[in-house]
Amino acid sequence: MPMLQFGLDTLRELDNGKAAIAFDRHVKRASTDCLDRPGDPKPRTVTLEIQLTPRIDPDSLDCTEVECRILVNSKVPPHHTKALSFGLRKNGILVFNPDSPDAVDQKTLLNDEE
């Protein structure tokens, strides 16, 4: 096979398409998160990073070869709950009211089982 010029259009030809497959998976992860959480307006990010490290010929001190590493990553907004009310005891223990997660000291009409 002849030499190919490296670029986005030839990414699938490199290393059995591993970088292209990883890129596709990260795009799917980000887009699926949009479907799962359409109410979260924060952006989903997919990055394709190309790291090029020169290799110097020891005889001529010229750079005639480059080591290439391809990194693919995605970032989705963190999953989080709404703010909950916890009580803090003097020994550092946190407590909460399962019947009223918004107000730890809220009394309820339910029977206490203490």
Image (cartoon, grey):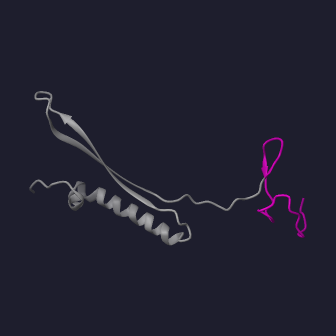
Left or right, 66 with reference to 85: left
Q: Quadrant of residue 25?
A: bottom left
Residue projecting furthest to the left: 2
The spot of residue 105 in percent (x, y) is 86, 58
Compared to 58, does 72 lie above or below?
A: below
Q: Quadrant of residue 112?
A: bottom right
The spot of residue 78 in percent (x, y) is 55, 58
Does the stretch in magenta take in 111? yes
Residue visible at 77% across and 54% down in the picture: 86
Left or right, 13 with reference to 98: left
Q: Quadrant of residue 54?
A: top left
- Magenta residues? 87-114
The spot of residue 49 in percent (x, y) is 33, 51
Q: How many marks?
A: 0
Residue projecting furthest to the top: 59
Compared to 11, does 57 lie above or below?
A: above
Residue visible at 34% across and 60% down in the picture: 23
